[in-house]
Amino acid sequence: MAPQPKRLGDIPVVPLEGGPTGRPQPVQEADDLPEGVRRRIEDHPCYSEQAHHHFARMHVAVAPACNIQCHYCNRKYDCANESRPGVVSRRLTPAEAIDRVLWVAEQVPELSVVGIAGPGDALANPERTFQTLEGIRRHAPDLKLCLSTNGLALPEHVDTLMELGVEHVTVTVNAVDPGVGARIHPWVRGQGRRLHGEAAAERLIRQQQEGIRRLVERGALVKVNSVLIPGINDRHLREVARVLRGQGVFLHNIMPLIARPEHGTRFGLDGRREPTPAELAAVRDACGGDVRMMRHCRQCRADAVGRLGEDLGPRFEREPPPPALRERAGAAGLRRQAARAAILRGMESRPGRAPETMDPSLRPVRMAVATRGGGLINEHFGHAREFLVYRASPQGVRFEGHRRADLYCSGPQDCGDREAVLQSTLRALEDCEALLCARVGIGPWKALEAAGIQPHVEHAMACIEDGVRAVYEAMAKAGQLQPSPAGLLADVS
């Protein structure tokens, strides 16, 4: 018997270097995209960093079964206080999901995307998934349809996805080497049997790449999610990014491992550590030259509702959808289209301040921002449940990600009394030198300054990028951006 291939280089699926010619292709930024592609992502909060400030998405939990095992996953049920993939409050039938989508779409006019991301795998539940997508397309054709999958069953369903108008597909690819993949996915199930170890990982890799190839050929925009797992695939993800570039993947989302013991995952119970923010940023930077990098992911629940970073789901869980939604769907769709057009006009017309010419040798700085959305610095420090992190440098302002935080101020009687929460937030922002927010109390202000994080409220209600740039330019004029001693901010790349 011929030896079985054990490494991706022996699996004849895609070239490792460049596009079809084998030459590396430049990574296109949003402004460089073809007009047709730009229009397809301009209101998609996951595919467009700018859109995520303005447009909402909705996940419907209609897919409970899964066909692979992942050491970072535990599809915990009915856990409303957790925000991580695979968690839902209630699983829905396709009919329930369609009605809930129409209800949310009627009440949240900025809703632009509906996706199926579990709590299992969308394509391990094809009948439920396709019934749901077909119903949404019939009653709300203005909404974009998305789907997230591990890719094991993807090749056999590409044609159906295209027929349903699903033009945005996310595939989770954590490895392109079966030896690495076997340490993440202990088994996969398909063709009536269960495979284990490297044989399972090899099968998964083959199916993922074949499915991605077919999607790209059909014109779909493919986003790949990769979970960064220290000690397992942290050094390997650069190879993953090179493969994705060769396949024509549109966007790569490298997400940090979530591995807390209380979640009950294998990695959590075994003590596998989560990556630090600096490690995540370094891996993203290392892979960003190969494929467009997504940095604004929130690792959403499988029943998430609202803009990224907010959760409107409980608002729609308290009572069942009202009657006659399907009869009103057409009028609601017209209101959404008008709201969408208004949002896009606002995004295009928002004035931006021209950056000053700066000495290119000045060091970069990370800054945290408190925002309620809309791309504005418009949140009180004490009310923020997360902070967006930006990197400012002479070359411009770049979004780097977000840091979760506990609510510091929960009411007039509690504001300022939660020292443990404040210390947790300071640790989360320890690599930032500035914090921009709408307001901040005297106590937290002093604590931030003592931690080396300078608060700024003078840019309240300004565009985030403009405020960050203005603070950076002020730091430059004050002589605070000269190259620092070795080791200080060494992780800001």
Image: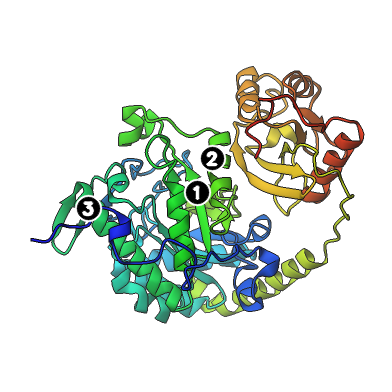
Rendering quarter of residue 271: top left
Residue identified by numbered label 2: 280
441 horizontally vs 189: left or right:
right
x then y, percent, for residue 59: 47, 58
Q: Amino acid at mark 1?
A: Ile
Label located before the other in sequence (1 or 2):
1
Q: CA distance from mark 2 to mark 3?
A: 27 Å
Front one among 113 and 71: 71
Residue identified by numbered label 3: 200
Residue identified by numbered label 1: 254
Give the secondary structure at mark 1.
strand
* Residue 55 higher or lower than 219, as above or below: above
Label located before the other in sequence (3 or 1):
3
Q: Residue 67's mark?
A: none
x then y, percent, for residue 403: 60, 37
Label located before the other in sequence (2 or 3):
3
479 horizontally vs 258: left or right:
right
